[in-house]
Image (cartoon, grey):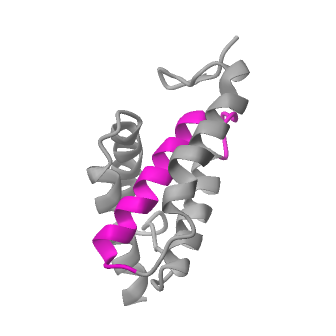
Amino acid sequence: MELQKEGFSWPPAYRVADNMAAFEAEVLVRLTPCRPAALEVVAESIAVVHAELMLIHPFRDGNGRLGRWLAGMMAVQAGHVVPDYGFVGRGSPLSRRQYIAAVGQGYAQNYAPLAGFFAEAIRRGERR
């Protein structure tokens, strides 16, 4: 049985090793370490890495936490602050819905919504 959650099916488990090798060769080599750049450029890099990793990550739960940890590391590497995703307190349900919708768009290689989410999270982190 392949991994599914909320109507989404991840690629088959037997593809994880090949997908991770392709992810490293095609995405990580190009976008990491994350170099200093304008916020929009950094957010786009984070979005691509995040979406592509989430698509092949082999676990039902914990994907987002791992991906957001990596996103925070990439932001700091690029000279920005740790993102504040807005998942705590007032407005948190909206932030979570926006994040999930943006990740879904990223699966289709439309990274703009996810890049916008990460850019706003970094801006929010700067205001802390």
Residue 56, magenta (yes or no): yes
Give the camera-side residue of 123 and 78. 78
Q: Tell me if residue 63 comes above or below residue 67 in the rendering.
A: above
Q: Tell me if residue 44 comes above or below residue 126 in the rendering.
A: above
Q: Left or right of 3: which side holds 110?
A: left
Name the dominant secondary structure of the magenta segment.
Answer: helix
Q: Residue at x 32, y 48 (%)?
A: 111
In percent of width and height, residue 98 lies at 33, 50
Give the camera-side residue of 30 and 104. 30
In percent of width and height, residue 24 lies at 62, 47
Q: How many marks?
A: 0
Residue 42, magenta (yes or no): yes
Q: Residue at x 48, y 79 (%)?
A: 78
Farthest residue toward the top? 1
Which residues fall within the magenta stretch? 37-62
Q: Is any part of residue 97 visible from this angle?
A: yes
Q: Residue at x 66, y 39 (%)?
A: 21
In percent of width and height, residue 117 lies at 34, 60
Q: Tell me if residue 79 comes above or below residue 110 in the rendering.
A: below
> Dividing the image into 4 quarters, which one contains the C terminus?
bottom left
In percent of width and height, residue 66 lies at 64, 55
Q: Is any part of residue 91 visible from this angle?
A: no
Q: Residue at x 35, y 33 (%)?
A: 108
